[in-house]
Image (cartoon, grey):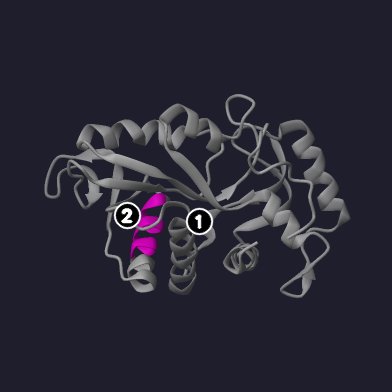
Amino acid sequence: MEQYKKEFIEFMVQSGVLKFGDFTLKSGRKSPFFMNAGAYVTGAQLRRLGEYYAKAIHDNFGLEFDVLFGPAYKGIPLAVATAMAISELYGKDVRYCANRKEEKDHGDAGILLGSKLKDGDRVVMIEDVTTSGKSIEETYPIIRAQADVEIKGLIVSLNRMERGKGEKSALEEIEELYGFKAAAIVSMKDVVGRLYNQECRGEIVIDDAIKSAIDAYYAQYGADQGAGEGNVHGTGV
């Protein structure tokens, strides 16, 4: 696993973004882990977060694109922070764009914030995490309605590796439905590999009990990963 991925996993835990315990998700599933990107609240955290996203985008999509699109609302600060990080790390100036939940009819009117989309723009979409793909389902038509753009792909912070609407993960379903690549900074397999019975910031975050709960969760809700990420049960890094 690349060093920045190990650091990102530790960063999520340290920031209180990735937690382990007993949580009820919006889907009604009982999960032994929970991720909340809204817990990134300081300038220093957002700066680091943008750098991790920038490195993952560079690894998965290269830098041959023009716009970072962040779906409202959590995607907006992600797009801004990552656009800044791409400029600082790679000297590449990309524009940011986001959508509003409701169209504005005065001043800076329209459905978009930031840069307008233009014909021929190459777009990378950026989100925190996706479980069902609902956000992409809502924003994809908005992007397509603005201009004739090429969507290079979607980047999220964590691949939960659980079933979306069918038997495959939400990221794989997005790839099949829309025809563009969907990638993550890290997967839950990476998280377990880094944290299981290994110290993170002076403590064991995933002990045997939590590992057993994670295994049971994926036995019930794990996606059919095919030749992709594989199952989450591995412990290597």
* Residue at the image point whose x is 78% and y is 45% from the top: 214
Horizontally, residue 22 falls left or right of residue 128, namely: right
Question: Where is residue 60 drawn, in percent x and y?
Answer: 47, 52
Mark 1 vs mark 2, CA separation in Å = 29 Å
Q: Identity of the amino acid at label 2?
A: Glu
Residue that carries the numbered disc 1 in the rendered image: 38
Principal secondary structure, stretch drawn in magenta: helix
Horizontally, residue 160 falls left or right of residue 140, namely: right
Q: Identity of the amino acid at label 1?
A: Gly
Is the residue marked by circle 2 packed among few (<14), some (14-19), or many (20+) residues within 10 Å? few
Horizontally, residue 147 falls left or right of residue 37, namely: left
Q: Is residue 231 above or below residue 221?
A: below
Q: Is residue 35 above or below residue 171?
A: below
Q: Which residues are magenta?
A: 75-83
Residue that carries the numbered disc 2 in the rendered image: 64
* Residue at the image point whose x is 47% and y is 74% from the top: 44
Question: Where is residue 52 drawn, in percent x and y?
Answer: 50, 64
Q: Could you say whether the residue bearing mark 2 is in a helix, strand or loop?
A: loop
